[in-house]
Amino acid sequence: MNLFDPATYAAVRRPLLEAETLPTACYTSEEFFRREIDTIFMKVWNFIGRADTIPKPGDYYTVSFAGVPLLIVRQENGSVQAFVNSCRHRGAQIASGSGHAFAFKCPYHGWVYKPNGALSGCAGMESAKNFDRKDYPLVPVRTSTWGGFVFINFNPDSESLESFLGDIGTIVESYRFEDMVCTRRKEYEVACNWKIYVENAMEAFHVPHVHRASINRQRGSVKNDRTFDATQGNWVVMHKQHEGTRAVLVGDASFPPIDGLRGKAALGTFYPLLFPSTMLGCAIDCMWYLEIHPLSATRMRLIVGSCFPKALVQRPDFDAIAANYYKRWDMTTQEDIDISVVQQLGVSTSLSRPGRLSEHEPLVHAVDNWVLDHVLGVAKPTRRFQGFTVQDLDVLPENVVA
């Protein structure tokens, strides 16, 4: 099989109800994974955390994304800037973890950098010829923020973040993400391909089986439709209309709705995917995010962030009630991790074959084709997803073994 021949994916390119899933090698091949790194993660905007975790000038955190070590620093003017976390002397990482710093000193030979990346101290270079410290700042990485989220782009010639995200503001503006704070961030290392986890997060077809002991009780019946709204830009979304919040389990106490929610935001939950690998859960009272870092063809890092409006966080009973949200997210996250590992094991044999997609998996189809657009070199400046509605599956009868 030629993994980079468009003819290999003719069945994936068909309309949803005629389409097959990706060939299993797309989830196991290191060659395909390296092409994804080169054509997707090194070329487009990638989400790497919340700006509210570094509120003051000099606050910083470090992260590695797509194999690149990064240092993210709040600047004096309030902006956020990412740098390659590599000393310009002999390449050692100059910072680790997170915190606050007036300067960053390389642990190897003591070169010192200001928070804006400028080299301010370079021991041992007093006799160097034609050396000017101004020529050796930390290497900046293109950085932008939206809704309190931090994004980086390794491609200096890419479109703006605003253009990349398109019209996402039309559905999420009233949540006021920029006024939220991240109260908990939990990391997992998962033995599956990054696409397997993204695909799982963007369909509810699995809920009666994988989440039968948790959120399936909230799922509703076939009379409650799930909509997949039309989008312009590099994102897709599904919406479930319902009463109350879906961010806690049935019977657990929750917070009141966010003031000022408008339209469908006030009537249920939005689940956007920001391509390639960031998913949001936008409930009437909170927002949570799933941040995926690809590590190899069969490994990924998952970061789950919990975000609430600042006013809620200041409540004296916040910790007690927020524990109900954390319990729900911990339970469903582990269920999704477990089934993703099971799927990875299943596709990791040469005898596994592609399957067919159902009407309940339009966003799985959208994810796979977006990936192919980039890997095969046919990506458009923006991608429009044509919205539609399908009936949700009913809850499984009690006598059916899932």
Image: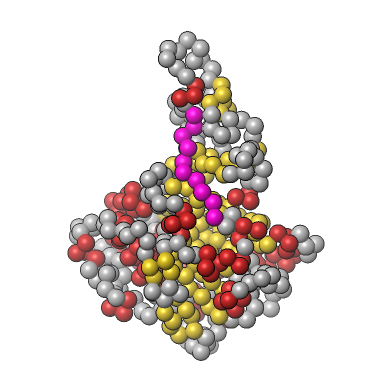
Q: Is residue 139 located in the magenta-colored stretch of the structure?
A: yes
Image color mode: secondary structure
Residue drawn at (27%, 58%) of the image: 378
Residue drawn at (42%, 12%) of the image: 129
Predominant secondary structure, magenta span: strand
Residue 211 left/right relative to 340: right
Residue drawn at (54%, 55%) of the image: 146
Is 365 located above or below residue 216 in the figure?
above
Q: Is residue 342 located in the magenta-colored stretch of the structure?
A: no
Task: Residue 342: give x, y in percent of width and height.
Answer: 42, 66
Range of residues picked out in magenta: 137-146
* Residue at the right extreme, as displayed: 316
Task: Residue 27: give x, y in percent of width and height.
Answer: 34, 60
Residue 21 visible, this angle: yes
Residue 343 left/right relative to 60: left
Q: In which quadrant will I find the N terminus?
A: bottom left
Please tell me in which quadrant of the rendered image residue 187 appears: bottom right
Is 135 located above or below residue 29 in the figure?
above
Q: Which of 314 and 300 is in front in this view?
A: 314
Task: Residue 384: give x, y in percent of width and height.
Answer: 38, 68
Task: Residue 290: give x, y in percent of width and height.
Answer: 52, 60
